[in-house]
Image (spheres, helix red, strand yellow):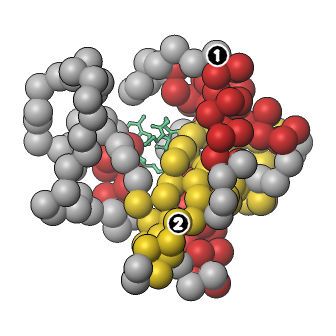
Amino acid sequence: MKILILDSEKKLAECAKLYVRASNGEPWNDQWTEETAFKRLLDFFNSPGYLGLYAEEGSGILGALVGNAEQFYSGSYFYLKEMFVLPEHQRKGIGTGLLNELKRILDERGIRSIQLFTSKKLFPFSFYKKHGFEIVKNMVMMNNDPHFGNGADEEPQE
Ligand SMILES: CC(C)(COP(=O)(O)OP(=O)(O)OC[C@H]1O[C@@H](n2cnc3c(N)ncnc32)[C@H](O)[C@@H]1OP(=O)(O)O)[C@@H](O)C(=O)NCCC(=O)NCCS
């Protein structure tokens, strides 16, 4: 498996198809179309500080991640916006490979902090915990839509 830089709109469009499959499946059961998924990935692609990676085996893409570096007063941090692996290829180390390569590249660029949002109830939480991510104490995500992320507040999955 090769991990490569995601730097073309053509590859991004291929990744959008994976994003639809990964996000419309478990555990999210979202309702993305190829069009909305491509627009979302393109938003990140066109952002300052963008960086994307994809995992390829043979000529097929198996997973990808995208995000962007943002300035903070203490330096830059990387905001990991999306990460996804084809459902039938999950739990084979592809996500780990992508994240490790991201950390290596960011380290070269002097960026040591990665931030992300995820559900504390679903299995990606345990994936990120395994890779050293922790809940930021005293911070909370806020939203003005009462239907956004609804559901009971439960303890995170370990
Ligand atoms: C989260 C995700 C990117 C991880 O990629 P991956 O290639 O499956 O991850 P790895 O094989 O490197 O690591 C596997 C670990 O991830 C977690 N994990 C991945 N898939 C899982 C599943 N179906 N059920 C439970 N845990 C799972 C587990 O902690 C697992 O470790 P284990 O196999 O030792 O129990 C991938 O599962 C995915 O694309 N999920 C759907 C989209 C998504 O949720 N993206 C993240 C949004 S915040």
Q: Is residue 31 above or below residue 124?
A: above
Q: Nearer the viewer, mark 2 or mark 1?
A: 2
Task: Give the quadrant of residue 5.
Answer: bottom right
Q: In the rendered view, does 28 fall on the left or right side of 4?
A: left
Q: CA distance from mark 2 to mark 1?
A: 28 Å
Q: Residue at x 49, y 58 (%)?
A: 79
Q: Residue at x 50, y 72 (%)?
A: 71
Residue at the spot of label 1: 33
The yes-or-no answer for disc 2 within 8 Å of ligand 1 is no
Q: Earlier in the sequence, mark 2 or mark 1?
A: 1
Q: Is residue 115 above or below residue 42?
A: below
Residue at the spot of label 2: 70
Quick check: which quadrant has ligand 1?
top left
Name the kind of residue labelled 2 in the image. Glu
Residue 117: percent from the left, percent from the top? Answer: 37, 47
Camera-side residue: 131 or 113?
113
Residue 69: percent from the left, percent from the top? Answer: 57, 65
Name the kind of residue labelled 1 in the image. Thr
Secondary structure, mark 2, is strand
Q: In the rendered view, does 102 fall on the left or right side of 4?
A: left
Q: Residue at x 11, y 35 (%)?
A: 154
Residue 96: percent from the left, percent from the top? Answer: 53, 58
- Whether residue 107 is visible here, answered yes or no, is yes
User: Badge 2 local density, few (<14 within 10 Å), some, or many (20+)?
Assistant: some
Task: Give the quadrant of residue 134.
Answer: bottom left
Secondary structure, mark 1, is loop
